[in-house]
Structures are given as C-alpha cells and as structure tokens.
Amino acid sequence: MKFTRRTLQSAAALTLLGAMAGTPAFAQDKPKVALVMKSLANEFFRTMEDGAKAHQKAHAAEYTLVANGIKDETDTSAQIKMVEQMVAQKINALVIAPADSKALVPVIKAAIDKGILVVNIDNQLDGAALKEKGILVPFVGPDNRAGAKLVGDALAKELKAGDKVGIIEGVSTTFNAQQRTLGYQDAMKAAGVTVVGVQSGQWEIDKGNTVAAGMMREHPDLKALLAGNDSMALGAVAAVKAAGKTGKVLVVGYDNIGAIKPMLKDGRVLATADQFAAKQAVFGIETALKAIADKKKQSEMPAEVKTDVVLVTKDSK
C-alpha cells in the first residue's frame, strides 16, 4: 500500500479520535467549572459568587468559571433550565446550591450521565432522591442543624422556660431549611421554651416580614423570632419595629450577611451564624478540580466535606 501525506494525516486523525473516545473534546483544555446558585438577590449568594470569581482569578491558568444564579429563591424551574444551559456549554464540573433538594436531582443525573462531575454546596440534595437515581453527589458545606443550635442556644440565654417563640423557616422543601428549624427546636426544647409555630418565609425579606407580623398578631406575648436566614431576619426586624416591639421581641438569623452587622451592633438582631459563603463555593470548586485532576469518576468522590459554621453576636471579633 502506498502511503501519501493525506493517508498519513487521516491515520493520525483517526488515532487521535480513538484516544479521545469517550472523552469530550473540551476536556483537553483547562477545566470549565459552572457555579449555579440560588437567588442573587440574597447577599449571601452574591458573596459566594464574589469568592468564587476571586478564586478563579487567582487560579486563572488552572480553570475557567461560569457563574450564575436565579432571581427568586423558589424559582426551581429556572434553576433547572440554568443547569441544562451550563451542560450545553460543555462544562467539566458543576458546583450547585440547589433551590430544591429533590427537584434538581433529575437534571443533575442527566449532567452526570454526560460525564460532568457534580458537587453539591449550601443546601444538601435529598439522599433518597439521589439513591433512587443511583447517583452519589458529594456535599460540601456546614452542619446546618448544629449551626442553628448555636444561634438558638445564644437566644435561650435571654429567655426563660415557658416563653413563646416563632420560627420563620426557609423554603420548606430544602434540606438546609429543615435542618436549621431542627437546630432551633433542639435549642428551644433544651431551654424549656415553647415554639408556637413554624412558617415558611421562603428565604426572602418580604415573606419573612409577613410571617413575623402574623405571628406577633396571633401571639401578642411572643418573645422571639428565629429566622432561618438573615434576609428573613431583616424582614422580621422591620415587622418588630412596625409593631412597636423593638427590644421586646428578640430576633436571630443565620448567614452573617453585611446588612445584618449594624443590627447585631445595636441589638435589633441578637445573633446569627457565619457559614462563610465565599469559602463554600471555593471548597466546592476545589473538590471538583481535585476529582478532575485525579481522573475520578462521580462515584469515587467523597460523600461529604464538612465546612465551618460559627456563632456571631455583637461581641464576636
């Protein structure tokens, strides 16, 4: 057989294609990581995005980053579409803070089936839903129940047995909302304090405000409101002020966003928890990058990577 330049080029191309079989072409370049968050109207997720972008800038030679978030904490369908768009952009890894612990699992399974590594941050995906789809997704984040108990314990020191409090929960279908409520309930039970109700403020200021106002109307002797995040705590503070109960109804939150800091200082908010938003995204990205570098499959990744959560009060350094 006579070898021409063209046949040699064709053979080389076929060899290259053979070597790349089963590996997306984009994987030959530096990895492309997508960060998909919940509502960017929430300062917590803007901080998370800023931390991720700063990390990528410092490691620009190592990976590229595409970051986005939904406008509304409850817009699960928009987040599902966002993941589908990221997958279409030929990403290598997806780091996601899911808006819903169950609803995002099918689209995550579809991403994994395409060879994309997925890491879960902030709000843990539902274990049963993952098992049903036969996938393992590592959770990189804090123990929300323990963090909320720290906040609840700090509040309990200002209350006495038999006092009444209300819990303003995040989106009730999310694992972190459920865990924070449990942490608050753990602390209140230990102190002999009565939880008169748990209602969802859907992580948002306005909804938190409405729930707080309703709870105070229904229970005029309410002593405190425990909000599942600082956005809802901001709404609760406004409701307490409008009811003329500043200093009489205590408020606690969770996340330690910038807007809560002056309120901690002047006592409008008694305590919150810092779970280091910027670090959470970075830990998730680093977990994904390590798996890519080590050529690990999704099923070979660690099940969980715990991150810190600490109590923050006006006395915190």
Image (cartoon, rainbow, N blue to C red):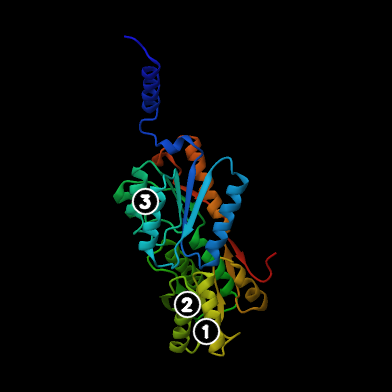
- Residue at 50% of width from left, 75% of height from top? 205
Residue at disc 1, secondary structure: helix
**1 to the left or right of 144:** left
The numbered mark at residue 172 is none
How busy is the neighbourhood of tag 2: few (under 14 within 10 Å), some, or many (20 plus)?
A: many
> Is 8 drawn above or below residue 1 in the view shown?
below
Quarter of the image that includes the N terminus:
top left
The numbered mark at residue 239 is 1
The answer to whether mark 2 and mark 3 are in CB contact below 8 A is no
Residue at disc 2, secondary structure: helix
Residue 148 image point, x, y percent: 52, 66
Q: Which residue is mark 3?
A: 108
Depth-wise, is mark 2 or mark 3 nearer the camera?
3
Q: Which residue is mark 2?
A: 208
Name the N-terminal-most of marks 1 and 3. Answer: 3
Name the N-terminal-most of marks 2 and 3. Answer: 3
**Amino acid type indicated by mark 3:** Ile
Task: Quadrant for residue 123, please give it.
Answer: bottom left
Residue 301 image point, x, y percent: 44, 41
Task: Judge by depth and name the residue closer to the eye, 85 or 72.
Answer: 85
